Each structure stands twice: as C-alpha cells, then as structure tokens.
Amino acid sequence: MLASLLRATSGSFILTVITRRQYGQFFRCNMHGKIGRREQAIVEELRQIFAAQFSNIVLQEIRKVEELHKTPIPAGEQKFTVMSYNVLAQDLIENHRGLYPTQDPEDLKWENRKKKLIGEIKTQNPDILAMQEVQQSHIPLFYNDLEKIGYKGVFKRRTENNTDGVAVYYKTDVFDLVFWTSVEYYQPGIEYLNRPNVGLIVRLKLRQGNGELFLANTHLLYNPKRWKVRLAQTQILLTELHRIIKMAKTSSPALLLMGDLNSRPGSPVVRFLESGFVRVYDQLLPLSLGILNNCTHLGESKLYNSDYTFHQKTNEQPNCRASPSFVKKFDQCPGEALHKNAMLEAGVLSHNFNFSSVYNLTEDEKYGTATTHHDKWVTVDYMFYSNLRLLSRLRLPTVDECKNFVQPMPNRISPSDHFPLLATFSML
C-alpha cells in the first residue's frame, strides 16, 4: 500500500515515480481514514509537486458513473444521456479576473479552455447537451464545431448588452427537434423581474419510437441576496413550460429541467422545484401579468419577449408573438373562478410537475456534493426529471473531497469553474 511507503519514507519523501495505481491506492486509504498526519503532510508535498497529475487521477477516482437501476430496463425503452454544463463564458473571465486570483493565467485562456471543453464533451458523449454561459461570439468558431460530431443546437442570449446565454444541443441521430422557444425573465415595470437572465424550452422527439421530451435549460440570477428574484424567474419558467406542454396536448410528458440555478440545496428555489410548493409572504408577480401562483397563465400569456418569435420545425401553427402587443393564446379560462383561485393561493407557490432530483440534495460537508466554488464549495447546478427512468449519473465530488483534492477552477484539468452534470435516462 502507498500508505506504508509514505510511512517508510517519512517527511523527507522525494517523489520519483508514482503510478496511477498508487495514486488510487492512496486516495482510497485517505477516504477511509487510514492515513495519519505524517502522510497528510507528505501528500501536501506531493500535491504541490505534481498538482495537475494528482487532481486528474483523484477526479477520475471520484467522478465515476453510478449505476442506479440494477435490473434490465423493459424492452422498447430507449436510453439517452443528458449533460448540463456551465461552461464559463470567456468575457466573464476577462471582466471579472478578480474572481480567479490563484489560477494559472494559461488555464484561463480561451484557446486552452476550448480544447478541454470539446474533449470533455467528446469523452462523455451526451445525446443532449444543455449549457449555460455560452458566449455568443464563440458559436460560429467553436460551438458550431459540435455539428461535426453529430449535434445541432439552439441558443438564447441574455438580454441587455450581455454577450453570453444558454444553449441546448442534441444528437441528430437520436432526436429530432419539434420546436423551441426562449423565455426572458426581464418584464418591464415588475420589481422581481428586472434582470436579464433567460431560459430555453425545447421539445424533442426520439427518432426511434414515439417518445417525446420537454427540456428546460436556464441560468438564474447570481446575487446571493436576491432569492425572491430567482424564485420569480423560476415561476416564469415553469409557467411557460406548462403553456408549451398544454399547447402540445400531451399527457404525462417526459420532463427535464436543468441549469445553473445559483441556489443552494434547501433554498426556496430548490425546495419549490423538488417538493412542488413553497410558502412566500410577498406576491412576487402582479396579477396584471396574468400568472397564477400555481404556475399557469390566467387565460393568455402577457409575457414580454424581445424575440417575438416561436421557433418550430413542424406543421403545427401555434399562435406566435409578432409584436409586443401580440399575446399567445392557448386556452380561454373561466376568468372569475381562476381569479378567485389566484387570490386563495396567495402566499403559496405551487406546480404539478412532480420533479425528482438526479443528485441527492444536502449541504452536509461530508456527504453533500459540490458543483462550483463561490465563497465556499457549494452546489448550484441541478438536473430535475419527471416521467423518466433514471438509470445512472456521473458522481459529483463531495464538499470534503473538493477541499482536499480539487485545485481552484478553471485549472489544467477542468476548463470551467463548474463541474458538469451527467445522467442517463430511459423513456417510460
């Protein structure tokens, strides 16, 4: 065992050759509490000398696929893999260099990061790739290269003068795009909807069989103090998702919602998505916007969207927004009854999507996972699903593992400051 070797060599340990297998042995010893302070001191020396190699091997030990469905899936159920990844827009690095004080400048250069990003995507080979912080100027030069390996995609830039947004790419030999639409969280004159964050809703159809999937990808506001803004943004996204599903006239749809929610486990946003309801003591959205507290439209959508366009690839002809005054109609409501219902539900937000989280949601430092580092290692990236069978997931590191083994990101191994999420599902 490497632990024995470390004891024998004492503090004067000089590393000459350490194999990947030995690294793995040490990692497993450490994870089970089988090494002492002397060995811990030596591994600090090892970490400093061979930091990149050490992190790479440890991450490979940590980030393994966890099989969650032990029995064979029923015949006819088609499997597909989904990745959600905040890829870190280069403009955000350049505009906020103070957030990366200890990183090697070489690891922050786009030329170096993009090679690692495409390598990561090729290695994981997802059938659906949902990304946040995609820089618009990089789409022609980089993200369109995904077409060479079988992907097509759609993109929505954040509003105002922002240069990044969210994107969804899909394997064209696995899925056909039925339609997609953007969601803008900026709504003129509304207190909690005054930020430029956006989302995408995509409807995909499996090329084999008749399975369809509705996917929402978003990046919510960062400001830690503005949780009500994030909750209002989530309410808008779910309301639009409900409208799209209702317009498609489908029952029990397969659903995925993912992205960088900038919210920790236990926060109102995450509790709302996971449990289906959350108590709020302010009316986040005015009734004039026509959105009820159960995340449905009061008759017709009054949401502002600067795109004014509904993107589609079928002969379906939903009513489309052509100007700011145009509203998308999908159902006439009984008016008074729903209005009273909205008042009765004041103080509680709810939805009926019955989401489950791909990853366990806890902030415990030993067992809770982390997807990025803000003021500390935290989880802010999520993947929720409904009416799908979860087969496996790529394990996330725990907070404790990140503290002990992960260098500040981006680094030579990780091209972003977030870990990607990855899961495999089958249609029920």
Image (cartoon, rainbow, N blue to C red):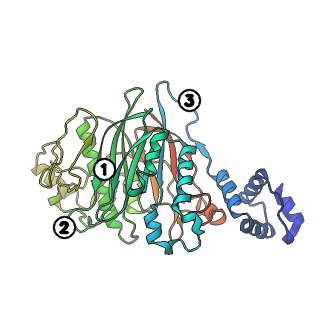
x and y, in percent, of residue 20 in the image: 76, 52
Give the residue at the far front of this rendering: 141
Which residue is disc 1 drawn over? Answer: 351
Vertical placement of residue 300 versus 399, above or below: above
Which residue is disc 2 drawn over? Answer: 189
Q: CA distance from mark 1 to mark 3?
A: 32 Å
Rate crowding at label 1 as few (under 14), some (14 to 19) or many (20 or more) other CA atoms within 10 Å. Answer: many
Say which residue appears at 49% left-offset and 56% top-offset: 361
- The label on residue 72 is 3
Which amino acid lies under the numbered mark 2 shown in the image of this protein? Answer: Gly
Say which residue appears at 33% left-offset and 36% top-offset: 252
Quick one: SS at disc 1?
Answer: loop
- The label on residue 104 is none
Say which residue appears at 16% left-offset and 51% top-offset: 298
Q: CA distance from mark 2 to mark 3?
A: 53 Å
Determine if residue 350 is in view: no
Quick one: SS at disc 2?
Answer: loop
x and y, in percent, of residue 73 in the image: 52, 30
x and y, in percent, of residue 427 in the image: 43, 33
Quadrant position of the N terminus in the picture = bottom right
Rate crowding at label 3 as few (under 14), some (14 to 19) or many (20 or more) other CA atoms within 10 Å. Answer: few
**Comparing labels 2 and 3, the label whose residue is closer to the camera:** 2
Give the residue at the far top of this rendering: 75
Mark 1 / mark 2, whichever is N-terminal? 2
Look at the numbered discs 1 and 3 and tell me whether their residues touch, using CB distance below 8 Å: no
Please state if 221 lies on the left or on the right of 323 as rendered: right
Quadrant position of the C terminus in the picture = top left
